[in-house]
Amino acid sequence: MRSDSTQHGTGYTPPAAPLVPVEDVPRRSPAEEARTLVAETNVGSLATLTDDGAPWASLITYGALPGGDLVIVVSSLAEHGRNLVRDPRASIVVAETGAHDDPLAAGRLTVAGRVVRPEGDREREALDVYVEAVPTAEMFTRFGDSSPFVLEVERVRWIGGYGRMGTVDVADYAAAAPDPVGSAADAVAHLNADHADALLDMARALGGHPDATAARCVGADRYGLDLLAETPRGTAYPRVGYAAALDTAVALRAATVELTRRARAAEAARVGPA
Amino acid sequence: MRSDSTQHGTGYTPPAAPLVPVEDVPRRSPAEEARTLVAETNVGSLATLTDDGAPWASLITYGALPGGDLVIVVSSLAEHGRNLVRDPRASIVVAETGAHDDPLAAGRLTVAGRVVRPEGDREREALDVYVEAVPTAEMFTRFGDSSPFVLEVERVRWIGGYGRMGTVDVADYAAAAPDPVGSAADAVAHLNADHADALLDMARALGGHPDATAARCVGADRYGLDLLAETPRGTAYPRVGYAAALDTAVALRAATVELTRRARAAEAARVGPA
């Protein structure tokens, strides 16, 4: 049946279900995903309105204020700068960085609202946030024709690649914290290169797939690891959680060591003495 | 004087001028730069108008028709799809791919115009162009809610990084060919890793800097190589041209071999027998 549906249907094969009950591991909320995407890069595309109300797309760099409003620095000589002075409505799309063979599999986020010109202490804060995020643009912030604008976010739409997406409540967006672990691409690569045995133990002992024959890590976040495991029943996607949510990126290493230790102890108890 | 201007001025030191007259080597026109950028990637950001006329930025993938109009495939369920059905005005920004430490040093291009729904043979051509550029999206072109749209380009603005930019005449954009050499990042890296001596000979014998002490390649296109050379008079930026403009990417190798041979012969004639 599975091979029939693969050959003649949509190509979708349902993942193998866990064989034993597993702990429900928290996952980033859409608002957390959105704030994490914003924090992970400093480049986006800005949509503004030309003098006849047509849309205009341009490349920008940005920094993010603590509540998720975005700071850009634009020149009054540039087309998008003139556009913003004329009409403050604006939208910025930010895409997940890192190589994807399939661009539509990347996470991305659109925020929209109105820009304001910050003044006094708010201008200083905006410039500090911008220069910290975009150090190579520091020089431009001192040019007379350049000014910071803050996009006050009124709407947020997040797309997590295929299948996960949604409108994010703007209050949730403002309140959410970026995940300090970020995309963790290096850590994921390290786990797969050097710790395949530990990942298999996690899939077997903690992920609910005691018959797994191979496992690799396909994602890491502040709450846990997403695994892809091969089983005689097909491919499974177990998720395993750390002892506690992480508050820093460097805590990821100790958390995966603890996960490995816990998985090995559980696997040894399950299989029994050799 | 130089160190004074560097310490107290803008940090800008003028490049060292050639010591001998050099051949004027053609350079890609802004229209060719624009078409090359479009051809080098398949991801951009789309600006559309929401139902209240506000700008909305979103990620898209695209293919380019022979005249430089862009094909996108969007779902009528997606916000940007609904926007385009309501108001066909649209703009797409495309940024140079490849790692830049400084995002604002990357080339980028904005095109703007109106989208149309191609019909009959034009729809077939649009879908073919799109699927060739974005093979991972082939499946979506067969979904009932997805349709191709062609952005008929009415305005083009190109920014080549710092310093080079301009509005490109739309007829020039339509008539220009993408440079088959593209960004040639791999070829440039290879020249620098393995052929530093040849690059130095080029800078000395063909680039007008016989006193150069080191040289590396900072860019390659269908017409020639951009070099950065160190001289006792400061840094120089010679440009050296091939015997003829290249029509394919693979021709770059033979062209640089010919350049090297020509530079070595000229350098040997200049320096005299050892």
Image: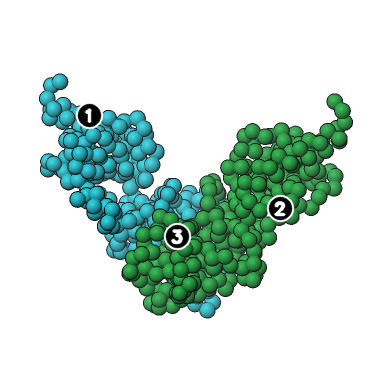
Chain colours: A green, B cyan
Q: Which residue is mark 2?
A: A245
Position of residue A225 in the picture relative to residue B232 (left or right): right
Residue at 37% x, 53% y: name it. B105
Mark 1 and mark 2: Cα distance apart in space: 62 Å
- For discs 1 and 2, the disc positioned in front in the rendered view: 2
Question: Could you tell me which residue is drawn at 78 percent across and 40 percent down?
Answer: A262
Q: In the image, are marks 3 and 2 on the same chain?
A: yes
- For the residue labelled by badge 3, is the local secondary structure a helix, a strand or a loop? helix
Residue B88, position as x, y percentages in the image? 47, 71
Q: Are marks 1 and 3 in contact (CB under 8 Å)?
A: no
Tell which subunit mark 2 falls on. A
Callout 1 and callout 2 share a chain: no
Q: Which amino acid, mark 2?
A: Ala
User: Which residue, given by chain and number where applicable, does mark 1 sit on?
Assistant: B261
User: Which residue does the numbered mark 3 point to in the structure image?
Assistant: A131
Is the residue B246 above or below the residue A244 in the image? Answer: above
